[in-house]
Image (cartoon, helix red, strand yellow):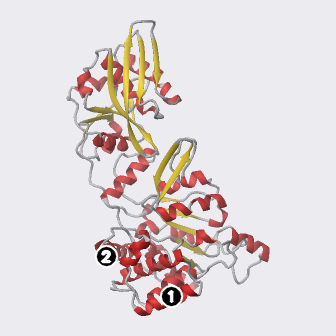
């Protein structure tokens, strides 16, 4: 007796279909799982056996062989439990095999028969729709997440005892997901809390409007971290496809607890002791890193000069391309990494900066060389954050996050109406030549700065992107000489003279 059930495994962030085949033969009772499975899948033998018996089903006293096809694809995680249980029940005639013909099954089972949530349910739902299936059976706790995928009937069950009714179509379908609530910013943080720092807030506004990377340099306690943590509060709301993408990534790594659609843009702030693989992804089986978890959001690197040099250099490719490709032996995975980088650093080891710096020249050189020239060249905005005056601390805020966000959304709308459909910070070199409109005086200023060596070829394009964003914030039809000068100044104000080239 043979039965087949379809489920899904994750290859990086992509769902891959897996056919679970259960074959029952006369012989000494045995339960074997084959098909390049990891330890957690092999342990399903004990979980499934106990779950079936504790749910009132009969476990076949025969030679049971379960094959996970295709055999060359690695399978991992407890999400195969429910599919293995369904295949065994169908092969033994305890549930109708025909009811599983156009359905996929994903879930973990407990020894008592409870169906527990597992990672990647949203990705499995997308895979089921792509495979042309009609139904998806998932844990009840993840039914709302799977229901985010349209044109797919999702049924959630809490225990194996509910399985026969669910396969007969008697179980209620998963409710439609509620509308996504408006994001209120990161834990209610608002730029109205900031006093002084008008130049820094202006730079963050430009960064949010165009998706540009920012480096804040200044002494400790001046407000660099306070500014960076309020960056999500001025970013535009997630589009529907972006929210689904963010939800899918976070579901796969186990960061989604409520099962709903992501409402706010991600904000990730890893500690400076993080490794290169933790930052951009890696491992023997490639898994996403912080750069991917910050996709469509903000990656904040505090104390940038304290990060391992190898980890920072690994960021160069995703900053340029918007994705990370991790290759391990015969395994290759591509992870999206389109984020806004906000970094903060002290001007020197003692942190005082000028005046009052106590560092020797060799210490200053070593500090500056921790940040390579190629990495700094990928940062669109580089500015100093100085101590606010006593008068500024006692004064009124520069602006609220809500007011700035309105300007940012308006600038993004102008960019979307212009053509490429991406923020200015993501424009390719050819798109820059097509999109950015320079007045003759601005063209002369740009040529002069490039001839002086102030800008590299990459830096020239990045300055043009920043200038176009400033023009979009002002509603200007073209980039003027003053705007291109401002864009160049924002790239080089506290440029470390001793940075490695």
Q: Residue at x 57, y 57 (%)?
A: 270
Q: Nearer the viewer, residue 201 or 123?
A: 123
Say whether residue 344 is visible. Answer: no
- Choose top left, top right, bottom left or bottom right for residue 172: top left
Q: Nearer the viewer, mark 1 or mark 2?
A: 1
Q: Secondary structure at mark 2?
A: helix
Q: Position of residue 208 (x, y in %)?
A: 43, 71
Bin the neighbour count of mark 1 within 10 Å (Cα to Cα): few under 14, some 14-19, many 20 and up.
Answer: few
Say whether residue 11 is visible. Answer: yes
Q: Which residue is mark 2?
A: 414
- Choose top left, top right, bottom left or bottom right for residue 355: bottom right
The total number of labels drawn is: 2
Q: Which residue is mark 1?
A: 447
Residue 232 to residue 171: above or below = below
Q: Position of residue 407 (x, y in %)?
A: 35, 77
Q: Nearer the viewer, residue 86 or 318?
A: 318
Distance between the alpha carbons at the discs numbered 1 and 2: 27 Å
Q: Position of residue 350 (x, y in %)?
A: 73, 72
Q: Position of residue 162 (x, y in %)?
A: 29, 26
Quarter of the picture containing the C terminus is bottom right
Q: Nearer the viewer, residue 9 or 298?
A: 9
Q: Residue at x 42, y 24 (%)?
A: 67
Disc assigned to residue 337? none
Q: Secondary structure at mark 1?
A: helix
Residue that sits furthest to the top in the current view: 27
Q: Nearer the viewer, residue 61 or 425?
A: 425
Quarter of the picture containing the N terminus is top left
**Left or right relative to 242: residue 370:** right
């Amino acid at each position: 007796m043979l039965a087949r059930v379809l489920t899904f495994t994750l290859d990086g962030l992509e769902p891959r279909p897996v056919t679970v085949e259960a074959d029952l033969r006369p012989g000494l009772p045995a339960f074997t799982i084959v098909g390049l499975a990891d330890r957690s899948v092999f342990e399903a033998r004990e979980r499934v056996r106990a779950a079936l018996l504790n749910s009132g089903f009969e476990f076949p006293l025969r030679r049971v062989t379960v094959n996970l096809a295709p055999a060359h694809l690695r399978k991992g995680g407890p999400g195969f439990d429910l599919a293995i249980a369904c295949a065994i029940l169908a092969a033994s005639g305890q549930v109708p095999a025909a009811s599983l013909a156009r359905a996929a099954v994903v879930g973990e089972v407990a020894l008592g028969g409870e169906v527990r949530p597992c990672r990647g349910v949203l990705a499995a739902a997308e895979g089921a729709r792509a495979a042309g299936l009609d139904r998806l059976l998932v844990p009840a706790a993840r039914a709302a997440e799977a229901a985010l995928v349209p044109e797919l009937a999702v049924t959630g069950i809490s225990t194996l005892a509910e399985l026969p009714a669910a396969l007969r179509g008697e179980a209620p379908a998963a409710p439609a997901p509620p509308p996504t609530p408006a994001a209120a910013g990161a834990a209610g943080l608002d730029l109205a809390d900031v006093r002084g720092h008008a130049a820094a807030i202006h730079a963050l506004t430009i960064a949010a409007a165009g998706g540009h990377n920012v480096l804040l340099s200044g002494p400790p306690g001046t407000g660099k971290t306070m500014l960076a943590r309020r960056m999500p509060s001025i970013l535009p709301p997630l589009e529907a496809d972006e929210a689904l993408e963010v939800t899918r990534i976070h579901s796969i790594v186990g960061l989604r607890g409520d099962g709903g659609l992501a409402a706010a843009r991600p904000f990730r702030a890893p500690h400076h002791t993080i490794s290169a693989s933790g930052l951009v992804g890696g491992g023997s089986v490639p898994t996403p890193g912080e750069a991917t978890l910050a996709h469509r959001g903000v990656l904040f690197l505090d104390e940038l000069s304290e990060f391992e040099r190898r980890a920072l250099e690994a960021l160069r490719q995703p900053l340029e391309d918007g994705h990370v490709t991790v290759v391990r032996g015969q395994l290759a995975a591509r992870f999206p990494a389109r984020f806004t980088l906000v970094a903060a650093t002290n001007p020197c080891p003692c942190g005082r900066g000028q005046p009052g710096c106590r560092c020797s020249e060799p210490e200053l050189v070593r500090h500056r060389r921790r940040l390579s020239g190629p990495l700094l060249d990928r940062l669109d905005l580089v500015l100093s954050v100085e101590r606010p005056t006593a008068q500024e601390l006692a004064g009124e805020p520069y602006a609220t996050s809500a007011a700035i966000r309105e300007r940012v959304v308006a600038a993004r709308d102008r960019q979307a109406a212009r053509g490429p459909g991406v923020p200015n910070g993501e424009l390719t070199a050819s798109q820059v030549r097509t999109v950015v409109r320079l007045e003759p005086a601005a063209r002369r200023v740009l040529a002069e700065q490039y001839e002086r060596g102030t800008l590299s070829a990459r830096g020239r394009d990045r300055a043009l992107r920043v200038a176009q964003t400033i023009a979009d914030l002002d509603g200007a039809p073209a980039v003027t000489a003053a705007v291109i000068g401002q864009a160049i100044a924002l790239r080089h104000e506290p440029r470390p003279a001793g940075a490695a080239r």
